[in-house]
Amino acid sequence: MVTNKDYVSILLHDDQKRILLQKRDDTPDFAGWRTFGGKVDLGEIFYESVVRETSEELAYDLNLLHPVHHMSYSNQKSSGNWHFFMHYIPESDKSKLQLLEGCDWGWFSVENAKKFTEIKKWGSLIPRLEGYMEEGKFLEERLLPLYHSWSCLLYTSDAADEEDS
């Protein structure tokens, strides 16, 4: 049975233009390096989901997030949407991060991250990510209208819980 699911990912980046990735574990479904994030719960807005997931996985409280990419996916098990958000982590905040889920984590340049299987699936996000990081921190005024319209969308599909029942 194919179910619809929505997921969020947080792309944390630093002054050295690196992104933080996690190695979730070595099971077939989660092997390899990937972003932090997870499934959108029924009734949550995407913003709430990414804040919750970041807290659960890194014990880090996010403030301003920037939605940067959306992509649809479909495979034999499910189909849905993946929503990517970015957040700049200043050097002073790195010590606040704690790995609560996964077996490893690390900071990677975009060039090195592109070698990982899960990251290769990002497609058009990679050049956008590189462009944003070249500019340094985000230009809030450019992304704010997108942020307001996108982060307020509710996930209301009942199909997401069918597989869990």
Image: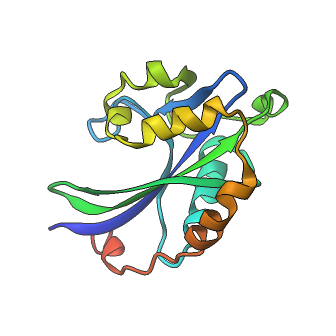
Image quarter where the C terminus lies is bottom left
Q: Position of residue 76 (x, y in %)?
A: 14, 56
Indicate left or right for 111 with 11 as reference: left
Q: Quadrant of residue 60?
A: top right
Judge whether 16 appears above or below 165 on screen.
above
- The residue sitting at 53% across, 37% down in the picture is 129
Judge whether 120 appears above or below 125 on screen.
above
Q: Is residue 62 visible?
A: no
Image quarter where the N terminus lies is bottom left
Indicate left or right for 51 with 159 as reference: right
Q: Position of residue 124 (x, y in %)?
A: 38, 42
- The residue sitting at 40% across, 64% down in the picture is 6
Q: Position of residue 40 (x, y in %)?
A: 48, 65
In depth, the one of 112 and 5 nearer the eye is: 112
Indicate left or right for 128 with 67 as reference: left
Q: Is residue 110 visible?
A: yes
Q: Quadrant of residue 117?
A: top left
Q: Position of residue 130 (x, y in %)?
A: 53, 32
- The residue sitting at 54% across, 40% down in the picture is 101
Q: Quadrant of residue 131?
A: top right
Looking at the image, the residue that sits furthest to the right is 92
- The residue sitting at 41% across, 32% down in the picture is 25
In depth, the one of 145 and 157 nearer the eye is: 145
